[in-house]
Image: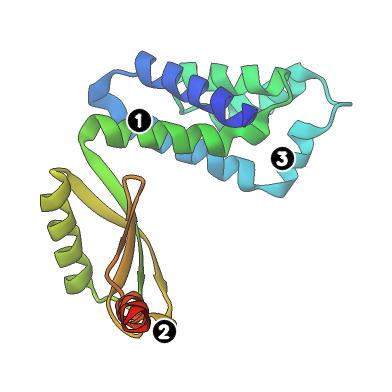
């Protein structure tokens, strides 16, 4: 995917320019930019080819004046190339680079029942011990068809500890005999 590789390049450039002690500030600035992009009126204005770049830049500077100048320059570059739609992908790639730098992995969890805070924290700690990293349960879905247990997607791996998969395995073993 071409957009993904460009997003990675932009995110890598931001990350390399970034001073590592200011990661939280840069992430906050990226969230501010994304929030502005969610405003339908602003997005329509910025995407309108009849409006001159200088007018768009003025609006951006007014709305985003508090962000780091290098990030504002990135917005200008994307604006001139009509690629503001890449911002969410750039922000996601940047988050991935920050997580990698800080030794963090994000997990997607599917469980048969909703997890309470204590269970979520315990799961994070157990997965963290296995991976040797801090684990954050980023998304959580509930699928009653699992019957029990959980399915975790983390670090490109699928860990299936659901009762449904164990029953399916048992069913296949019985069928072989």
Is residue 84 toward the left or the right of residue 95 in the image? right
* Residue to which mark 2 is pinned: 144
Looking at the picture, how far across and down is residue 49, in whole percent? 85, 27
Image quadrant in which you'd find residue 80: top right
Is residue 145 toward the left or the right of residue 46 in the image? left
* Residue to which mark 3 is pinned: 43
Residue positioned 18% across, 56% down in the render: 127
Is residue 135 toward the left or the right of residue 106 in the image? left
Residue positioned 63% across, 17% down in the render: 77
Number of on-image labels: 3
In the displayed structure, 34 sits above or below 13; it is below
Q: Earlier in the sequence, mark 1 or mark 2?
A: 1
Looking at the picture, how far across and down is residue 30, in whole percent? 46, 34
Looking at the picture, how far across and down is residue 163, in whole percent? 30, 80
Specify the quadrant that holds the N terminus. top right
For discs 1 and 2, the disc positioned in front in the rendered view: 2
For discs 3 and 2, the disc positioned in front in the rendered view: 2
* Residue to which mark 1 is pinned: 97
> What kind of element bears circle 1?
helix
In the displayed structure, 115 sits above or below 41; it is below
Is residue 79 toward the left or the right of residue 166 in the image? right
Between the C-alphas of marks 1 and 2, the distance is: 34 Å
Image quadrant in which you'd find residue 6: top right
Looking at the picture, how far across and down is residue 4, in whole percent? 57, 31
Residue positioned 24% across, 42% down in the render: 104
């Amino acid at each position: 995917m071409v957009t993904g590789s460009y997003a990675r390049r932009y995110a890598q450039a931001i990350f390399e320019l970034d001073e590592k002690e200011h990661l939280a500030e840069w992430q906050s600035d990226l969230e501010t930019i994304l929030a502005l992009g969610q405003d339908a009126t602003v997005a329509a204005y910025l995407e309108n080819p009849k409006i001159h770049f200088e007018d768009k830049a003025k609006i951006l500077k007014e709305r985003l004046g508090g962000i780091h100048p290098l990030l504002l320059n990135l917005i200008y570059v994307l604006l001139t190339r009509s690629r503001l739609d890449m911002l969410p992908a750039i922000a996601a790639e940047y988050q991935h680079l920050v997580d990698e730098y800080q030794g963090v992995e994000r997990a997607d969890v599917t469980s048969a029942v909703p997890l309470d805070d204590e269970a979520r924290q315990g799961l994070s700690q157990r997965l963290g011990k296995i991976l040797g990293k801090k684990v954050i349960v980023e998304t959580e879905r509930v699928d009653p068809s699992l019957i029990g247990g959980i399915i975790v997607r983390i670090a490109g791996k699928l860990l299936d500890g659901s009762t449904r998969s164990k029953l399916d395995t048992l069913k296949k073993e019985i069928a072989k005999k």
